Amino acid sequence: MSRSGRYVFRVYFEESMRGNRDTVEKKLTELGALTEWSSANLLAVDARDADHGQQIADYLFEQQNLDQLVY
């Protein structure tokens, strides 16, 4: 078995954060990530490689520090 090289993140939006969902998803898409909702509060985010994964992680970390989401 070989690794795909892709990175997957799970992003959780608490009830008080749900108003930010569309903005965050749009920005992730603009960054080139693939996204998929698994529930009203949980978003899966796929990055193509380590460099892209770091870019996505940096954005998610920034948003988490602003209390916009949890990842």
Image (cartoon, grey):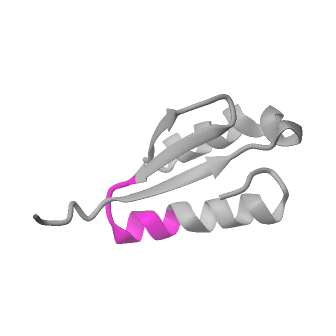
Give the residues in magenta. 47-55
Q: Quadrant of the N terminus?
A: bottom left
Residue located at (43% from left, 47% from top)? 32
Count of marks overlaid on the render: 0
Q: Is residue 54 magenta?
A: yes
As drawn, the residue found furthest toward the top would be: 40
Q: Residue at x 51, y 56 (%)?
A: 9
Kindly give the residue lying farthest to the left in the view shown: 1
Q: Quadrant of residue 48?
A: bottom left
Q: Tell me: 34 left or right of 11.
A: left
Q: Nearer the viewer, residue 41 or 50?
A: 41
Taking 50 as reference, is 44 above or below it? Answer: above
Q: Residue at x 56, y 65 (%)?
A: 57
| Predominant SS of the magenta segment | helix
Residue 23: image x %, image y %? Answer: 70, 37
The one nearer the camera, 69 or 62, is 69
Position of 35 compared to 41: left or right? left
Give the x, y percent position of residue 69. Answer: 75, 51
Residue 64 position within the rendered picture, expressed as x and y whole percent measured from the top left? 75, 61
| In magenta stretch: residue 48 | yes
User: Where 39 falls versus 6 (above or below)?
Assistant: above
- Residue 37's quadrant in the figure? top right
Identify which residue is drawn at 53% across, 60% down: 56
User: Which quadrant does the C terminus fall into?
Assistant: bottom right
Residue 43 in the image: x percent, y percent? Answer: 57, 41
